[in-house]
Each structure stands twice: as structure tokens, then as C-alpha cells.
Amino acid sequence: MRKTKPSAETQQDAQAMAKALQRPNQTKEQTKLIAQGIQKGIEQYKKQQKAKARERDKALKKAKPSHSSTPAQATPAAQGASNALPWWLLAGSWVLFGVYGVYTLIASAN
């Protein structure tokens, strides 16, 4: 891994935190070491957040194609079932209409 120089913002944040935590009789050298430790912590936190963001993006990319293809596959089957119901109802009504017509013919003949 290559070493990168921390940003000026990170250095300023670390220095500000170190000064806020400074104790009485603490030397400038000790404050500087504390600031370096805080700076390393900030850098490590940023790296972790970047790694989490990358993993989240990878998961979204994997989920997106499978998520979009699943409804597309389920839709034709659902449409086929929903399209069949009206046809069955139409056929059933014609059968009942025919039975009723035959029954009325037989009843009127007697």
C-alpha cells in the first residue's frame, strides 16, 4: 500500500481536538503526538466508511439486476392467470345460457 499524505482538513481537525483535550502542564510535543494519533484515527475511520460504501454499492448493483428481472418474470405468469379468468367466466355464462335455453324449450313443449 502506498502512503498518502493526510488532507489539511484532517490535520486541522486533529490539531483542534488535541488542543481541546490538552491538559495542564502538557508539552507541545505531547500535544503533537496526541494530534497525530487522532489524525490516524480519523484516517482509519474514513477508510472504513469508504469500504462500507463500496460494499453497499456492490450489493446494490448485485440486487438491482436480480430485483428487476424477478418482477419481469413473474408478470407474464400473473397476466396469464388474470387473463384466463374472464375467458372462463364468459364460457361459463354461455354454457349456463345454453342450458337455460334448452330447459325453457323443454318446459314450453310440455
Image (spheres, rainbow, N blue to C red):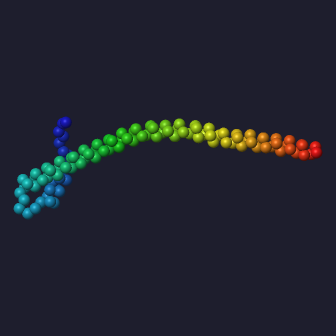
Where is residue 76 shown, x and y percent of the image?
58, 37
Q: What's the residue at 56%, 39% (across, down)?
A: 75
Which x, y percent locates residue 24?
A: 8, 63
Residue 57: x and y in percent read: 36, 41
Q: Indicate the position of residue 36 as horizontal and vertical percent values.
A: 13, 50
Q: Residue at x 21, y 49 (%)?
A: 42
| Residue at horizontal 14 percent and vertical 52 percent from the top | 35
Q: Residue at x 82, y 41 (%)?
A: 98
| Residue 62 relative to residue 51: left or right | right
Instruction: State which quarter of the image contains the C terminus.
Output: top right
Question: Residue most toward the right?
Answer: 110
Q: How many marks?
A: 0
Q: Is residue 29 left or right of residue 78?
A: left
Residue 11: tell me if it is visible. Answer: no
The correct choice, above or below, for 29 with respect to 88 in the image is: below
In this rendering, would 45 be left or right of 69? left
Q: In front here: 16 or 79? A: 79
Residue 18, quarter of the rendered image: bottom left
